[in-house]
Amino acid sequence: MEEKMQELKKRLREIYDIHSALSVLSWDQNTYMPPAGTEARGRQMSTLGRVAHEKLTDPALGQLLEDLSSYEKSLPYESDEASLIRVTRREYEQAVRVPSDFIANFYNHTAQVYQAWVEARAEDDFAKVAPLLEKTLEFSREYAGYFPGYEHIADPLIDRMDYGMKASAIQSLFSELRKQLVPLVEEVTSRPSVDDSCLLQHYPKDKQLEFGMNVSRKLGLDFTRARQDLAPHPFMTKFAHGDVRITTRVKENDLGEALFSTIHETGHALYELGIDPSLEGTPLHGGTSSAVHESQSRLWENIVGRSRGFWNHFFPQLKEMFPSQLGNVTLDEFYRAINRVQRSLIRTEADELTYNLHVIIRFDLELAMLEGNLAVKDLPDAWRSRYQSDLGISSPDDKNGVLQDIHWFMDYIGGVFQGYTLGNILSCQFYEAALKAHPEIPEQIEQGEFGTLHGWLKENIYRHGSKFTSEELVQRATGSTLTIEPYIRYLRKKYSELYLT
């Protein structure tokens, strides 16, 4: 069995390395690659994607897993080896359903559609990318078709990112959350608007980046194992246990854009960097789901990064960095500005109260497209209609509408957006559990000390990688299944104090 385990790990290391190379190619296209490299980049990613898929679906790998079945049963469920066999089997059984030609063609397609999106967004020209998005929708439906017996066509796509979740469960959860949020949004937005003009001055790009990186270091990001670059849409990716990349984007007339994007992506990076290094080279060396991953980025960005205690520590440093812009601004004014609630168009810039309404709109639209009830050509109008009905605001253009997010233009349609709201919910559930274990965390945050919180997250979430499903991990870390109650408590308390008292 030891020999078979070593053979399994050898095969998995090769697949891991190929996927790491794919991540390098994707990161390069998102940051520095010249546009004329798109065709070749699609070919390169297609080749590597095919090779990785063929290695994962090799019958010899399937036989290894079969041979190791009795050995797995003899081990503790939570052991590294039992988890490796279990998770690899799940990935193998999913992958063998999908032809290698499909995977290769989809990698090539996504390279082309991404570049078209970059250009279409810059030119505010949805028609430029619409035919490619129609092809993406065809790919998405075809992928779902390889998993017959689904309850909803989106379920196989959701399962890729949030294993075990179904569209029906997410719709039910979102419906309850919307029922709780809409009245609170109505109540808060009926009050006098908060003045956030202090954020909307000229803030030089280099100084914004410098301050953001200083915050990331303080939160625990090790820049001997990470780096930050610029991209049209902020993201995090990992090449190896010692090589994680984050990106941000800067608006020189909006201090919050780069700052909170940087903290958000730092949360993702801390998760990946905190995984047990012994798991590297296997399917266990990565976050367990999009929901848990987003819980970490949103926890650091919002619960920590938008808290008053956080800025008790960092605001004097920020004022020192930008004396002419913030010299006459009080901590209270700044804190209220970064937590201003308003009906807005851009998801990544949305406040905590309205953010999930943005996600629910996208989730509903992608379900409609997958079901065949919404054509791609009608997507911009459907987008504007939903924003008007749900948020009371509508974009006059598409670059701030249907073209604002990268997701449908670099992956399948379906299976990604739900992770953002599930992550918001889990962020508060995890934070409450951390506070129960360490009530001193808020006081430490005010002193600029984040080690206790980071340590709890690393011990209870990060180090496990994807050994456990989301459901298992949440139960282990919090003693409960996923629930919206901590999240609703957090929002009501914070925004009642800001707006309703």
Image: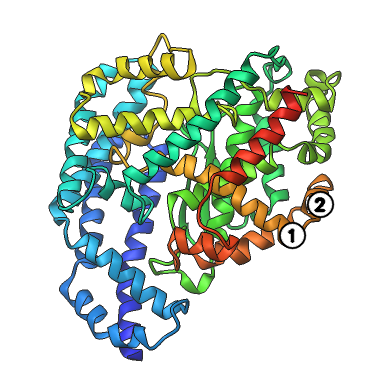
* Residue 245 drawn at (x, y percent): 51, 49
| Quadrant of res 366 | top left
User: Helix or strand or loop: what does disc 1 sit on?
Assistant: helix
Where does label 2 land, which residue?
Answer: 444
| Quadrant of res 321 | top right
The three-letter amino acid code for the residue at tag 1 is Thr
Q: Is residue 161 left or right of residue 217?
A: left
Where does label 1 land, which residue?
Answer: 452
What whole-number distance in Å separates the C-alpha atoms at marks 2 and 1?
A: 8 Å
Nearest the viewer among 402 and 231 is: 402
2 and 1 marks in contact (CB < 8 Å) = yes
Whether residue 465 is situated above or below residue 313 in the rendered picture: below
Can the viewer see residue 98?
yes
User: Helix or strand or loop: what does disc 2 sit on?
Assistant: helix
Task: Identify the residue shown where x is 69% and y is 39%.
Answer: 305
Q: Is residue 21 left or right of residue 176?
A: left
Can the viewer see residue 253?
no
Task: Identify the residue shown where x is 68% and y is 57%.
Answer: 434
